[in-house]
Image (cartoon, grey):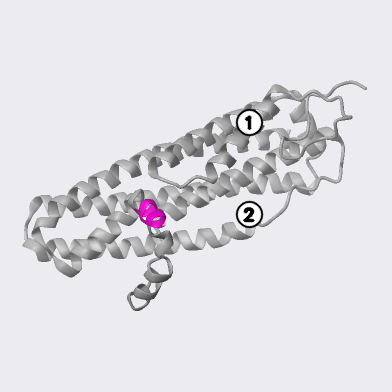
Amino acid sequence: MAATPFSPTLHHQSSKSLPCRPHPLILQCNQHLGSLEASEATSSSSSLFCHKLADLLTLHNCVEKLVQLPLTQEVLDKEHQEKWVDELLDGSLRLLDVCTVAKDALLHTKECAREVQSIMRRKRGGEMEVTAEVRKFLASRKVVKKAILKALENLKATLKKGKFSPRNKDHQTATLANLFKDVEVITLSILESLLNFISGPAQSKPSNWSLVSKLMRNKKITNTQETEQNEFSNVDAALQSFVFHMKPENISHLQNQLENLESVIQDFVEGLETLFKRFIKIRVSLLNILNH
């Protein structure tokens, strides 16, 4: 039997009786997938998310090359009227939508953070003006979190869906469909984690804090470490504290935290913009193949 350039993804091991030799791009994509899946099990920080975005870009660079293969184009052309191909296109659009939500949330937060810093530097109107601007920032964060929550609710339904189910069960078609779905799922999963990071952990009600702190005493160190690594949560908490206590000596520290947050946002935005462009290129390639 002639060997084909495709083989099942590493997540769906094929029978040892199959003599198929994997195409190098299939192997590369699965290696990147395995690395990204392993990274999902680690605690998140801004630096780790920057690495994850870079790794996602590497994966999608590999996917773009895979789409350009003549045999990949042949499969897609042959299957262009099948449901799984429509789902593939829907998925490519979904990646763009989620990426846009994340970018918009970051840019909005960055703009508001700059406004707070500007007021702090001018020091006009004293603490009251600074407090008013801080309240505006916190209000804008609520808007951002609401938009993120809506996007996350939509994502939950998407991530619960199973594999593509091509009616054509031949080896090449099944392998390609499964790989594309694996790529979509891991990408959405990482973007979901990033949205949660930007939003920050849900805060407990003050009346429940004493009980929660007792029940969670054993997990205190882990949760504290995760919070310390989240610049968004740190700034939210620091500004909320300032609103209640308004200590002038805290302003310098707040400025440092806001500058740090702005730097993190810039790194995230750059990573997402590069990834967004790659998503567009892959989607355009798919559409060109299917509309040929």
Q: Nearer the viewer, residue 217 or 185?
A: 217
The main secondary structure of the magenta stretch is helix
Q: Is residue 88 above or below residue 207?
A: above
Quadrant containing the C terminus in the rendered view: top right
Q: Is residue 257 left or right of residue 94?
A: left
Quadrant containing the N terminus in the rendered view: top right
Q: Secondary structure at mark 1?
A: helix
Q: Nearer the viewer, residue 231 or 38?
A: 38
Query: In the image, residue 266 lies at what x, y percent?
Result: 34, 40
Q: Is residue 12 left or right of residue 65?
A: right
Specify whether residue 291 is in view. Answer: no
Q: Secondary structure at mark 2?
A: helix
Residue that label 2 marks:
159
Residue stretch in magenta: 221-227
Q: Residue at x 80, y 23 (%)?
A: 21
Mark in front: 2 vs 1: 1
Q: Nearer the viewer, residue 237 or 4?
A: 237
Query: In the image, residue 151 lies at what x, y percent?
Result: 51, 58
Q: Nearer the viewer, residue 19 or 173?
A: 19
Query: In the image, residue 214 lies at what x, y percent?
Result: 39, 70
Q: Using the image, tell me which numbered label, if any, was put on residue 31.
A: 1
- Amino acid carrying label 1: it is Gln
Q: Residue at x 53, y 36 (%)?
A: 56
Q: Residue at x 78, y 28 (%)?
A: 6
Q: Is residue 25 left or right of residue 102?
A: right
- Amino acid carrying label 2: it is Leu
